[in-house]
Image (cartoon, rainbow, N blue to C red):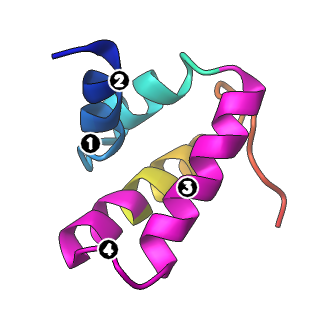
Amino acid sequence: MDWLEEFWEDMLSEEPIRIVAAWVTLDEEAQAAIWLHLERMATEEGWAEVQRAAAQAALDAIAEEGGSRTGYLPTA
């Protein structure tokens, strides 16, 4: 498994510890791009329900951290 597969496995694991650990490895620009992608996954049609749930779990875990350790956290 390459780093990108491992990253997404962690981000979509629905395990807050793994999600935040993967999130903090990103710089602010990458965090912004990943946050927007997760929002699309969680809210747009075309994703399987399991993918939507995993994306929402990732968004929730990141938001729960409040950005204090993670850097980027959107305000909207």
Mark 3 → mark 2, Cα distance in angstroms:
15 Å
Residue drawn at (59%, 40%) of the image: 65
In the image, residue 16 lies at what x, y percent? 35, 41
Residue named by callout 3 = 37
Q: Residue shown at 15%/16% (left/top)?
A: 1
Q: Earlier in the sequence, mark 1 or mark 2?
A: 2
Q: Is residue 66 left or right of residue 19?
A: right
Separation (CA) of disc 4 from disc 3? 12 Å
Residue designated by label 2 = 4
Task: Give the image quarter of residue 76.
Answer: bottom right
In this rendering, which labeled residue sits more in front, label 1 or label 2? 2
Identify the residue position indicated by label 4 in the image.
47
**Residue range highlighted in magenta:** 27-55
Q: Is residue 36 visible?
A: yes
Q: CA distance from mark 4 to mark 1?
A: 20 Å
Q: Secondary structure at mark 4?
A: loop
Residues at marks 1 and 3, CA–CA distance in whole angstroms: 18 Å
| Amino acid type for the residue under numbered disc 4 | Trp
Residue 5 on image: x %, y %? 26, 27
Mark 3, secondary structure of its residue:
helix
Amino acid at pointer 1: Glu
Label 1: few (<14), some or many (≥20) within 10 Å? some
Query: Label 3: few (<14), some or many (≥20) within 10 Å?
Result: few
- Residue pictured at 42% horizontal, 51% vertical: 58
Q: Which residue is mark 1?
A: 15
Question: Between disc 3 and disc 2, whose residue precedes?
Answer: 2
Distance between the alpha carbons at the discs numbered 1 and 2: 18 Å
Q: Circle 2 — which element?
A: helix
